[in-house]
């Protein structure tokens, strides 16, 4: 007799060939599980390649809501002989491996269930066209999963119908392929997986979206009208997200568009155009990844020193150099915080999921206009390109864009003298005008050379020093108005905390739960912006140790906390991760326990231990 | 002190144009370039052209990069916003500015280093995107601010002050712009104001990318006897192939030059131009036949000036990408933000 399966807590992974059409079948599985009411996350682990190399798709299914990546695969759909060996090795004991048994294969694992479905043979029997034979293989394995792990047949079919809404003729053959897989398993296979899916109600009010689409959509909602960019993985889909939504939401009756989207000749031109448009009063942005930031550096310094609003989305990937273009990292923190030569310091927003990519996209435009300076939205490949289950997006119709201190013609008439860089209000933020506003007043000369408060060229060292100090004061003044850290005090007595930011948050939170179950209670602060606000410093003051979990080698955020929040170096424990994969809870747990070995008084810092003893 | 405001004092009876501005209102701060610099003559020609065109000065955006030429945007049109950006990158900044507000007049001033070397990529792409702007390259074949290095437009036959030759061929910006699809391409000499002012006017009227490559001698580093960009050399080798004159509105177009040598052109904004062919073998409206003729002049060491190419289709970037006819920076926030109902529909599509 088979033991009762575990429901709705498992990892389903697909090993396929890049360019074989598997991506839409895999997304169909993820969406089906999501629509069955189970929280999921889907991670695309892909090569920098168009066709032929191995690619993977991992779905974490968790009714408990643990949708960070998890090691160990419960159900592996191994469709690529190139990666059979490593795919089989990843399956947990008692797990399931499904493969195309047209050519039978011994996987050398007697501790897992191996299910062979002669997928290629069945397709060859039903279709003659080579392309169809290839594409429908993907639907066959989806069909097999209906029987093997309980994907809901109706939900899958509804998903297919939705996918081919505009090409209804394709529904029938896809459903046919689906049923061929399903029925083959029903008639020939007698295996019960240790894990199964069943309908639940854990996704009410939730949607599935990538961070790049959300950020692009945020730019539409923020009123951005100019998007200038150069294609680079993993940021490309961000501007495409903006473009797709703008196409639907910004079209005028005469067929023209209330947006301009330019694919530039390189990243230098992309950021130059965004700066030109911003200078001229449009909300403009560019999206890129690490190598693009390096190329944009000179222009970023211009925007900083000439005080031009600028929004940059940095969807980070593995560096340095070309690095790992299709893997995730958080390794541009210092590069962006101090981008460009000379003294600079930039605002960074740190979204933790696609939902925050949407809200922080809007916030970034407000901050850029308010502080007249570059603002980086520091996303990464994991958030940007993967589908996350998040709360439905919300919009307050009363929200108006904060365009900051801009003088129109009427305001110019009111004042005696306009001085572009004069600190009139004492907050370091000067007033600006758009070109063409007033026939007599308000014009000024924008330059990257040192300038007086009216924009005139100067080599006066005193004026130069004053400008640098004012600009720093201006940017520092943003700290309390940017998204504040999310602080979770799991125990008032705990003297140890994890500090993290961005896409690692689900793994950190799951790791904290695991640690607590083992008796280690740590507090938690997720940073959401730089420069750091007082709340960050206060949190640090309340703890003896801060374990800074981040996905880069050099513990860049730790450096920033050290330098900019003035936190003692002995207090900041580096917990780096740099393998390019989305973080797991087990990494967090192990790294924390490991780090605590080195803390002389760590036992005293663990409150539940104390109380337990 | 290198930012010198001009005295406000002016003659009380200075003539004003129809927008109520005097010639002085089109000037800028005092030039800090070397006495006799060709660029200052270009500045004067810009002031003259804008005054005569009666452009509301504040509706012009002055764009530039880095170098002696790029500094000059400070020396004219004080009532305009100016943007002295980074080296070689003015085209992208101008493109972005133009995207934000299609209704302003964009006047870019650059040099041969800024355009033909560090900025070559951006220049080419601004041309092919048909950015609606007048791009003036003040071309002196040398890097002045860094004291006399060869630039990429320096002719191979042209030696520097120390008698050194460059081993490399020069880049001809006009030929390149014609090939890349610029609609208006002209070459001029800074020492010939009579030729330059009408070209600037026509370039400002033109809708699309207009280039004027102005040979503008560097008196300090490239005005010696062995230079092909000296005042003397250009004066003696200047061959005007086509002339473009603005026809004042009140003048009826009746005059006929020699048959087949003169055409009247009406630009997009209604401005009337008279195009006169001074070299009968040269047709500035046909890129295919024009380029070989230009090459012939070049081989003879002569400088073909005047209007070199004119495409009367006058398409600009906004036409090509279909943006709204209103300046994007004037579209109100409520129109731009789709609101909560649209977001609810987007949420539904992601369940």
Image (cartoon, coloured by chain):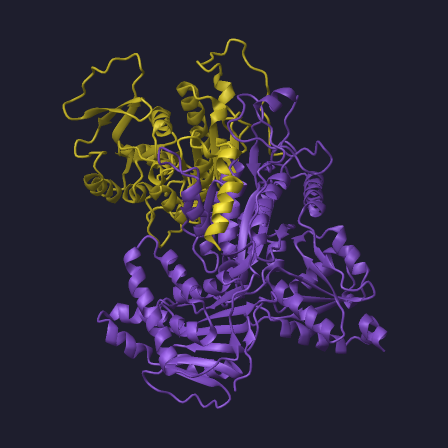
Chain colours: A purple, B yellow
The residue lying at 76 percent from left, 65 percent from top is A569
Q: Position of residue B235 (x, y in %)?
A: 33, 32
Figure check: B226 above or below A385:
above
Q: In the rendered view of the protein, which quadrant contains the C terminus of chain A?
A: bottom right
Q: Position of residue A518 (x, y in %)?
A: 73, 76
Q: Indicate left or right for A467 with A259 as reference.
A: right
> In this image, A30 relative to A368: left or right?
left
**Quick check: A1 above or below B351?**
below
Q: Observer-nearest residue: B277 or A68?
A: A68
Question: Would residue A324 be seen by someone viewing this image from the given angle?
Answer: yes
- Residue A284 visible? The answer is no
Residue that lies at the very extreme toward the front in this rendered image: A1
Residue A193: image x %, image y %?
49, 80
* Residue B153 placement, left or right of A388: left
Say which quarter of the image contains residue B288: top left
Q: Which residue is found at the position 65% from the left and 22% from the top?
A: A415
Q: Is residue B342 above or below residue B166?
A: above
Residues A422 and A115: in front is A115
Q: Residue furthest left?
A: B259
Question: Measured from the top left, where is residue A239 in percent x and y?
Answer: 46, 50
């Amino acid at each position: 007799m088979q033991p009762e399966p575990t429901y709705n807590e498992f990892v389903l992974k697909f090993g396929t060939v890049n360019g074989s059409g598997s991506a839409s079948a895999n997304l169909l599985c993820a969406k089906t599980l999501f629509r069955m009411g189970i929280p999921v996350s889907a991670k695309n682990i892909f090569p920098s390649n168009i066709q032929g190399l191995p690619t993977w798709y991992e779905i974490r299914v968790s009714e408990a809501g643990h949708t960070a990546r998890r090691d160990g695969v419960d159900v592996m759909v191994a469709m690529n002989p190139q990666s059979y060996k490593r795919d089989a090795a990843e399956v947990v004991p008692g797990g399931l491996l499904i493969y195309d048994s047209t050519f039978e294969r011994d996987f050398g694992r007697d501790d897992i269930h191996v299910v062979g479905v002669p997928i290629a043979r069945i397709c060859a029997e039903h279709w003659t066209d080579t392309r169809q034979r290839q594409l429908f293989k993907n639907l066959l394995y989806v069909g097999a999963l209906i029987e093997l792990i309980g994907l809901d047949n109706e939900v899958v079919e509804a998903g297919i119908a939705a996918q081919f809404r505009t090409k209804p003729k394709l529904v029938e053959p896809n459903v046919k392929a689906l049923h061929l897989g399903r029925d083959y398993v029903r008639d020939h296979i007698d295996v019960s997986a240790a894990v199964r899916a069943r309908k639940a109600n854990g996704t009410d009010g939730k949607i599935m979206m990538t961070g790049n689409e959300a950020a692009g959509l945020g730019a539409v909602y923020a009123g951005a009208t100019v998007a200038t960019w150069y294609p680079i993985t993993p940021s490309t889909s961000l501007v495409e997200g903006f473009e797709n939504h703008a196409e639907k939401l910004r079209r005028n009756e005469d067929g023209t568009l209330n947006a301009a989207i330019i694919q530039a000749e390189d990243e230098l031109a992309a950021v130059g155009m965004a700066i030109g448009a911003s200078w001229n009063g449009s909300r403009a942005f560019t999206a890129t990844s690490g190598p693009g930031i390096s190329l944009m550096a000179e222009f970023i310094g211009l925007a900083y020193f000439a005080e031009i609003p600028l929004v940059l989305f940095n969807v980070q990937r593995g560096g340095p150099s070309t690095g790992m273009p299709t893997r995730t990292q958080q390794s541009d923190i210092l590069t962006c915080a101090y981008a460009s030569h000379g003294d600079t310091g930039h605002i960074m927003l740190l979204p933790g999921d696609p939902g925050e990519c949407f809200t922080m996209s809007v916030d970034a435009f407000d901050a850029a206009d308010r502080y007249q300076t570059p603002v980086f939205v520091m996303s990464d490949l994991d958030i940007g390109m993967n589908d996350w289950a998040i709360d439905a997006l919300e919009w307050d119709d009363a929200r108006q864009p904060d365009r900051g201190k801009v003088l129109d013609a009427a305001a110019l008439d009111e004042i005696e003298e306009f001085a572009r860089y004069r600190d009139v209000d004492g907050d370091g933020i000067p007033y600006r005008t758009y070109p063409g506003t007033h026939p007599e007043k308000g014009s000024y000369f924008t330059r990257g050379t040192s300038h007086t408060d009216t924009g005139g060229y100067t080599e006066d060292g005193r004026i130069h020093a004053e400008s640098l100090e004012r600009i720093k004061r201006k940017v520092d003044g943003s700290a309390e108005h940017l998204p504040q850290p999310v602080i979770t005090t799991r125990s008032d007595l705990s003297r140890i905390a994890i500090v993290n930011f961005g896409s690692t948050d689900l793994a950190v939170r799951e790791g904290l739960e695991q640690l607590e179950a083992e008796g280690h209670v740590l507090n938690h602060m997720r940073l959401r912006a730089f420069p750091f606000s007082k709340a960050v410093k206060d949190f640090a003051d309340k703890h003896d140790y801060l374990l800074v979990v981040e996905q880069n080698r050099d513990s860049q955020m730790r450096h920033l906390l050290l330098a900019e929040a003035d936190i003692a170096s002995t207090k900041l424990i580096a917990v780096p991760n740099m393998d390019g994969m989305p973080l797991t809870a087990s990494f967090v747990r192990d790294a924390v326990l490991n780090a605590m070995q080195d803390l002389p008084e760590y036992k005293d810092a663990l409150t539940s231990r104390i109380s337990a003893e | 002190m290198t930012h010198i405001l001009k005295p406000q004092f002016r003659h009380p009876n200075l003539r004003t144009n129809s927008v109520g501005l005097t010639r002085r209102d089109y000037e800028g701060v005092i030039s800090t370039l070397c006495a006799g610099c060709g660029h200052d003559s270009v500045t004067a020609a810009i002031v003259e052209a804008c005054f005569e065109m009666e452009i509301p000065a504040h509706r012009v955006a002055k764009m530039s990069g880095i170098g002696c030429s790029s500094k000059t945007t400070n020396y004219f049109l004080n009532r305009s916003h100016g943007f002295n950006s980074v080296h070689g990158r003015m085209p992208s900044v101008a493109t972005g500015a133009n995207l934000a507000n299609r209704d302003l007049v964009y006047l870019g001033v650059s040099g041969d280093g800024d355009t033909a070397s560090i900025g070559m990529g951006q220049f080419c792409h601004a041309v092919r995107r048909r950015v609606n702007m007048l791009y003036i390259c003040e071309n002196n074949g040398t890097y002045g601010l860094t004291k006399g290095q060869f630039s990429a437009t320096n002719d191979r036959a042209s030696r520097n002050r120390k008698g050194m030759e460059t081993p490399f061929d020069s880049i001809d910006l006009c030929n390149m712009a014609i090939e890349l699809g610029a609609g208006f391409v002209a070459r001029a000499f800074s020492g010939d104001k009579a030729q330059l002012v009408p070209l600037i006017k026509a370039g400002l009227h033109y809708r699309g990318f207009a280039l004027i490559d102005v040979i503008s001698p560097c008196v300090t580093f490239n005005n010696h006897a062995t230079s092909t960009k000296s005042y003397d050399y250009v004066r003696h080798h200047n061959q005007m192939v086509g002339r473009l004159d603005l026809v004042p509105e009140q003048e009826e177009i009746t005059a006929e030059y020699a048959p087949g040598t003169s055409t009247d052109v009406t630009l997009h904004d209604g401005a009337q131009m008279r195009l006169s062919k001074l070299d009968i073998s040269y047709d500035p409206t046909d890129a295919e036949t024009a380029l070989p003729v230009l090459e012939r002049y070049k081989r003879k060491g002569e400088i073909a000036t005047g209007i070199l190419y004119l495409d009367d289709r006058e398409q600009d970037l906004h036409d090509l990408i279909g943006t709204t006819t209103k300046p994007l920076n004037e579209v109100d926030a409520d129109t731009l933000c789709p609101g909560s109902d649209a977001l609810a529909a987007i949420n539904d599509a992601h369940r």
